Amino acid sequence: DTVPPQVVPGADPSARQLCFAWGPAEVLVCETLFGRAGGFRSRCLFRSPCPSRFWGEGTVGAAARALTGSVTGTGDGASGSSRVFVVRRDQDIYIQTLRKLFNESHGIFMGLQRSEEELAGKSRKAQLVQVSKNYRSVIRACMEDMHQAAVSTRDPALQGQYSTQVSILSAMELIWNLCEILFVEAATAGPLLLRLLDWVRLHVCDVDSMVREVLSSESPSKHKLFWNVVDVFVLQGRMDEARHLLSKEASANPASMNMYKILDDLMKKMPVPSLGNTQTLTELELKWQHWHEECQRYLQDGTFASNPHMESICKILLGDEDAILEKKELMTTWYHFLVTRLLYSHPTVKPMELRFYAQSSMDLFLGGESSPEPLDMILMAAFEFEMHQVIKECSIVLSNWWFVAHLTDLLDHCKLLQSHNLYFGSNMREFLLLEYASGLFSHHSLWQLGVDYFDHCPEYGRVYLELHIERIPLSTEQKALKVLRICEQRQMHEQVRSICKIMAMKALRNNRLGSALSWSIRAKDAAFATLISDRFLKDYCERGCFSDLDLIDNLGPSMLLSDRLTFLGKYREFHRLYGEKRFPEAARLLLTLMTAHIAPCSFWMTLLTDALPLLEQKEVIFSAEQTYELMRCLEDLTAGNPDKQKFQDDDVETTKVEMLRLALARNLARVIVKEGTMEGS
């Protein structure tokens, strides 16, 4: 189908060439510095998957807003600033008053998916009808909220926006209700007409104000719109209300009492289908035929000739198309005319016969004076039982994917779309759910609903979720943890690592080493854990103490992720043992850290310096063998240092080395004396 182009407000493609880049749920458009006459130069600003549209681009109303005007430069084109626009395909998700629609329908959708195994036969049909009614109640509640917002606002622009949304929601409920009658409930001949009458009464509300005005007047029968209201009741099959009003006319005009009684009797005796199946269609048709002949007899006898209003009502009861069309302004729509026509000419209409009556009713009602609107074409497709055409037309006309996604899912559960697969592999239900969920992911909070929709798309849902969840802005740790939990629940290991790495890098940039280390451990990223461990050790060297002690003290098995992290954990354990005056254990651990070669070479001097207080203790801590090991480590450090000359020229380092040598020599002497004394004894 040919789709009209979408205009981006503020952009002038006639003056400047535009470049664009696809996003998951929007398009980034920017003005280049080249006029229409110049060469076209542009580059993709970012790349990410954009799901293809089923019926062409631009089927959903686009909205744009300017983001920045900071792009400047010179070149072949003219100097100046350029504007950047974000063109969204599902602008409706940003309307605050529609949040109820998205949130509450999500619960209904999830309940429907969970009830897959349940009832069969009539119980299952009743359950699906109830689900459909739940969806409609959400639409109606949202429509009422939108109407209230339109009434209360003083901003004309907002008022117009709200009024437009009310009209769209009203059309959505109208279409959904008809689909519920024809497809979900699959009403049969007889009950079908009753359902269609309820449908018209619920949705054709243009005459309600007129009815209220007449009924609230002191003398309804004298009101100028009295007969219009009676006609409306008759046209909608509301016989009891019509008879009640006519009784007021009879009381006010005794001369018409006889005509009133006859008309009242005809209206009272009119056969109508029943929901209880207490009579067969054949019985109903026979009763209706006898009643119809009685009406015809009274009309031909001229019983109502003296009262044009009653005569007109009698003609309507006979199903006279010309008489019904005279009330065109009271019906307002061709589908109201259709239902009235069926009520008085073919009350036992079968579902498959609707298409013929619908087409002729639309032709008669419009009469060539106007062409059908998109809503008319959708309703016509429904009357023709063209479900796929209904979904297609709704996708083109409506401003978001909510309606078609949920309606298609419901029809799929009714086993009505099983045979329709799309040429690229996914079925229609899954395609529309993917499109709807993709739109939700562009919203800062509604993306959480989109996760559940992707979960119930068996073929491509996981792939879409993986692609979209990587693009969620991780603005806070709380949000990151929420995203992480979703990924962990679905064993999305690659995404878990990616999120943890991103958060670790953010924490590191903000110098939050504890948080960075925690995220890197969660990501199981050994290289990054090593980098952060080095930062911890560097901070210790500069400040003389550790930060985030709780985290380091409780590393547990996580310290085995990398050698440097193991060293950090064990070095902190050395400080804890020293603080608890468990000097022999601290000495053994310190020596192990040096001889196991997991400590960075740059940290050896710090470790040897940490040995000084233990070497100077009154009680001998290091054995002769341990002392020799420390000496060897000191010589390896001084001899193997690539900056040996610089090391020797540094007075502080030279002093440390001399102090260590002296302390080691003194400790060795004490050990030899102690061990010799012990051997001698």
Image (cartoon, grey):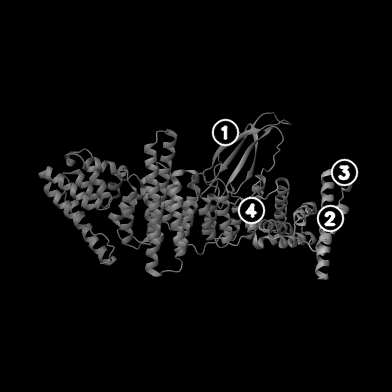
Answer with mark 1 or mark 4, whichever residue precedes in sequence.
1
What residue is disc 1 on?
10
Q: Residues within 10 Å of mark 1 (few under 14, many from 20)?
A: few
Q: Amino acid at mark 4?
A: Leu
For the residue pair 519 and 572, the one nearer the viewer reads as 572
For the residue pair 461 and 540, the one nearer the viewer reads as 540
Q: Say whether marks 4 and 2 touch (CB < 8 Å).
A: no
What residue is disc 3 on?
649
Separation of marks 4 and 2 at Cα, in angstroms:
29 Å
What residue is disc 2 on?
634
Q: Tell me the tag on residue 549.
A: 4
For the residue pair 456 and 523, the one nearer the viewer reads as 523
Which residue lies at the image location 68% right of the left edge and 49% below the top edge? Answer: 545
Answer with mark 3 or mark 4, whichever residue precedes in sequence.
4
Answer with mark 1 or mark 3, whichever residue precedes in sequence.
1
> Which one is closest to the eye, mark 3 or mark 4?
3
